[in-house]
Image (tube, coloured by chain):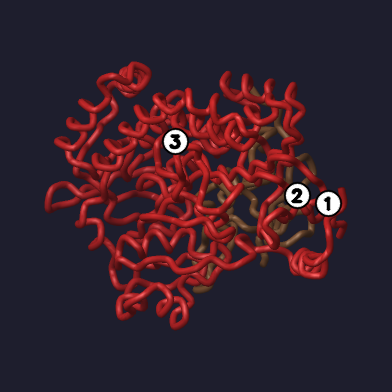
């Protein structure tokens, strides 16, 4: 069993395996990464920093590519913008 | 924001197999080398590591990288080359101006995505993308996955996911059984590739594998629940948690094009020493032709050696390169996209995901540029990296010129970059 860490996604605590990317943590929690121009929920598509579908606010910094960033304990992720 | 100037003999952009090989070979000849990579860790897409599955090949190259004294700049995204001797990269810590005498571009490839109804639902992902998730530690055990699209990556991904406990509901390959049979024959003489094929077959025993079959729609309310796949003139619905879907690979040629390297048929044109049309700029791996990891390693070595004037050593690798390139051509023929895939979009199907531009909005235009100007297709943050290759296939639109920055970049970086463009860099 890999080590588990806790991150906050839109204010809710989510326990994820240490090492997963933030985009993977959002998929695990069932939370879409962003809302599209016409209001559709979107998740990661390419997982390699190309498509920008997974962008989210991470520790206060907006528009970060969540597939390129690994979760760290206590990280704050928000999908409000 | 700090702008840091650094100077090297050889700068390699891209930390996948080609870039690692180039950096190692140049550094082992005594050159001062930097390896600049966008990802948090080296290995590129194919040797991507996580806490699990650290590969032996990557470990070997990394060891040589360190003993060669290569400066590793991970998490650094090159966005511009304002002068013929520097590239600029953005990192979380600030802006880098990286000076070089010779430059090796090993920017790799990305998956080709083709739109179909509801492909924008969460959990419809690239095949390599889902694999990357799982490699980072995402628990896939017990999940039902449909793997669809085209190319050898599908089998590798399916086998990997199954090994991690996923239930592979079906593998759908758009190529026909006949093209795959021809392709298998071309593997004769490639002992390693035959061994890989046999191993995959064993790992995938019992998994339904269908040829001449492709996704025609995804279904679900807010998240993927099922996928409809073609079955002759009909379709079949398969319930699943994930659709891992990719239509082979597209080379990342944006940076080479920005730096002035000539492209031919969508790939960077190089000579036998991997030299591009720009003096002192080399290119290796998938941007010069989709050929797989072994060819990328050979090309990377050639580029690294050529960049430090060891053409003699580079020439010894030409034979190996030629043989692997034949395989690459066979690959291209076998997995060519069938024209039926052009008709899977409905009028309301989103083609450009960044700007939510539908198929119906794009259909009236005659060129990529016209569509961009009128519909905003390709104007979002991916800069057409996803919808560009899709519209090239759907409508035959050629991509036009690339402009800096090649990636969305903070305004602050652009300002610093512009104000320093005329100054000599710090040594």
The lab-note entry on whether marks 1 and 3 share a chain reads: yes
Q: Which mark is residue B143?
A: 3
Chain A: its colour in the image is brown
> Which residue does the numbered mark 1 point to in the structure image?
B5
Label 3: element kind = loop
Q: Are marks 2 and 1 in contact (CB under 8 Å)?
A: yes
- Closer to the eye: label 3 or 2: 2
Query: In the displayed structure, would residue B147 be above or below residue B76?
Result: above
Q: Are marks 1 and 3 in contact (CB under 8 Å)?
A: no
Q: Are marks 3 and 2 in contact (CB under 8 Å)?
A: no
* Chain letter, colour red: B
Label 2: element kind = strand
Which chain does the numbered disc 3 sit on?
B
Corner quadrant of residue B210 = top left
The lab-note entry on whether marks 2 and 1 share a chain reads: yes
Residue at 58 percent of width and 53 percent of height? A31
Q: Is residue B174 left or right of residue A6?
A: left
Q: Earlier in the sequence, mark 3 or mark 2?
A: 2
> Which residue does the numbered mark 2 point to in the structure image?
B99
Residue B188 locus on image (x, y percent): 25, 21
User: Can residue B138 be seen at all in this image of the molecule?
Assistant: no
Q: CA distance from mark 1 to mark 3?
A: 48 Å
Between B262 and B108, the residue placed more toward the observer is B262
- Closer to the eye: label 1 or 3: 1
Residue B147 locus on image (x, y percent): 35, 40
Residue at 69 percent of width and 39 percent of height? B35
Which chain does the numbered disc 2 sit on?
B
- Closer to the eye: label 2 or 1: 2
Between B30 and B329, the residue placed more toward the observer is B30
Residue at 70 percent of width and 29 percent of height? B27
């Amino acid at each position: 069993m890999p080590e588990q860490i806790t991150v906050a996604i839109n204010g809710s605590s989510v326990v994820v395996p240490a090492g997963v990317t933030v985009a993977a943590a959002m998929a695990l929690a069932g939370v879409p990464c962003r809302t599209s121009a016409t209001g559709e929920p979107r998740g990661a598509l390419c997982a390699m920093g190309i498509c920008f579908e997974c962008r989210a606010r991470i520790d206060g910094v907006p528009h970060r590519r969540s597939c390129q960033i690994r979760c760290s304990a206590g990280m704050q992720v928000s999908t409000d913008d | 924001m700090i702008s840091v100037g650094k100077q090297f003999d050889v700068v390699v952009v891209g930390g996948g197999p080609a870039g690692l090989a180039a950096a190692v070979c140049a550094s082992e000849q005594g050159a001062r080398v930097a390896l600049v990579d966008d990802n948090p860790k080296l290995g590129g897409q194919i040797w991507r590591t996580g806490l699990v599955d650290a590969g032996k090949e990557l470990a070997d190259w990394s060891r040589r990288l360190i003993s060669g004294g290569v400066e590793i700049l991970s998490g650094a995204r090159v966005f511009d080359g304002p002068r013929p001797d520097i590239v600029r990269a953005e990192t979380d810590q600030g802006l880098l101006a990286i000076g070089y005498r010779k430059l090796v571009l090993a920017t790799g490839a990305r998956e080709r995505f083709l739109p179909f109804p509801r492909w924008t639902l969460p959990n419809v992902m690239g095949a390599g993308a889902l694999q990357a998730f799982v490699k980072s530690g995402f628990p896939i055990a017990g999940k039902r996955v449909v793997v669809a699209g085209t190319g050898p990556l599908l089998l590798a991904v399916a086998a990997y996911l199954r090994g991690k406990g996923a239930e592979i509901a079906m593998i759908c390959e758009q190529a026909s059984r006949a093209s795959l049979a021809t392709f298998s024959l071309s593997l004769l003489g490639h002992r390693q590739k035959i061994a890989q094929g046999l191993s995959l077959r064993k790992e995938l025993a019992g998994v339904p594998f269908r040829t001449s079959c492709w996704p025609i729609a995804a279904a679900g309310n807010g998240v993927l629940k099922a996928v409809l796949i073609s079955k002759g003139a009909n379709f079949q619905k398969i319930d699943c948690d994930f659709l891992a879907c990719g239509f082979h690979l597209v080379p990342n040629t944006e940076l080479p094009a920005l730096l002035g390297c000539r492209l031919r048929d969508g790939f960077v044109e190089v000579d036998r020493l991997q030299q591009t049309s720009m003096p002192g700029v080399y290119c290796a791996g998938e941007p010069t032709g989709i050929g797989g990891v072994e060819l990328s390693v050979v090309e990377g070595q050639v580029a690294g050696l050529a960049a430090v004037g060891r053409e003699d050593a580079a020439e010894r690798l030409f034979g190996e390169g030629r043989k692997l390139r034949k395989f690459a051509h066979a690959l291209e023929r076998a997995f060519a996209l069938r024209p039926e895939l052009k008709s899977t979009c409905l009028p309301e199907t989103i083609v450009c995901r960044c700007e939510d531009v539908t198929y119906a909005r794009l259909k009236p235009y005659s060129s990529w540029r016209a569509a961009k100007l009128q519909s905003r297709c390709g104007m979002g943050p991916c800069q057409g990296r996803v919808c560009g290759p899709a519209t090239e296939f759907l409508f035959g639109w050629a991509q036009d010129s690339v402009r800096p920055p090649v990636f969305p970049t903070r305004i602050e970086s652009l300002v610093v970059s512009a104000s320093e463009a005329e100054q000599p860099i710090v040594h």
